[in-house]
Amino acid sequence: MGWCERGSDLCIRSGPWFREMVIVPYGRMQAVEIKAGPVDRHWGVASVELVTAAMATNASIDGLPAEEAKALRDRITEMAEEKDAAL
């Protein structure tokens, strides 16, 4: 699992055996959510889920430290607003 923030989009790579790379343009994002169940909260981790206009499934970045997930959500929201996205 890996991810990187680029100028106009977010790249998410996942899969130990079957690799998948999803590129999500900031301008297509409709919502950025942080999810953490009871076990996640116990261990201090969370997932950042990206909801987009055109994707059949939502992209997510799992297992981030909770504070890093919040900071990432804020950065993505800021970038999407700069790109005149629907957020």
Image (cartoon, helix red, strand yellow):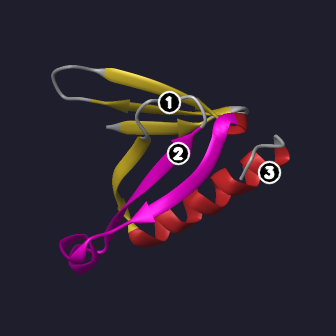
Q: Position of residue 37 (x, y in %)?
A: 26, 71
Please report contact status of discs 1 and 3: CB closer than 8 Å, yes or no. no
Please tell me whether residue 60 is drawn above or below residue 9 in the rendered image.
Answer: below
Q: Is residue 81 magenta?
A: no
Q: Which residue is drawn at 51% across and 46% down?
A: 50
Q: Where is residue 21 in the image (x, y as percent from the top left)?
A: 41, 23
Earlier sequence position, callout 1 versus callout 3: 1
Horizontal side of residue 75 vs 73, given as left or right: right
Give the Cα distance between marks 1 and 2.
Answer: 8 Å
Q: Nearer the viewer, mark 1 or mark 3?
A: 1
**Residue denoted by label 1:** 55
The quarter of the picture where residue 8 lies is: top right
Q: Name the residue under label 2.
A: 51
Viewer-proximal residue among 51 and 15: 51
**How far across and down, in percent of the image, does residue 1 sit?**
31, 37
Q: Which mark is residue 2?
A: none
- Residue drawn at x 28%, y 77% is 41
The residue that disc 3 covers is 81
Q: Do the residues labelled 1 and 2 touch (CB within 8 Å)?
A: yes
Tell me how far mark 3 sits from mark 2, CA to CA.
15 Å
* Residue 78 place in picture, x, y as percent: 74, 55
60 with respect to 26 (left or right): left
What's the residue type where badge 3 is placed?
A: Glu
Q: Which quadrant of the view contains residue 3?
A: top left
Q: Which residues lie in the magenta part?
A: 28-52
Alpha carbons under labels 1 and 3: distance apart: 19 Å
Q: Does residue 69 sit above or below 53 in this rendering?
A: below
Residue at left offset 48%, top offset 64%: 68
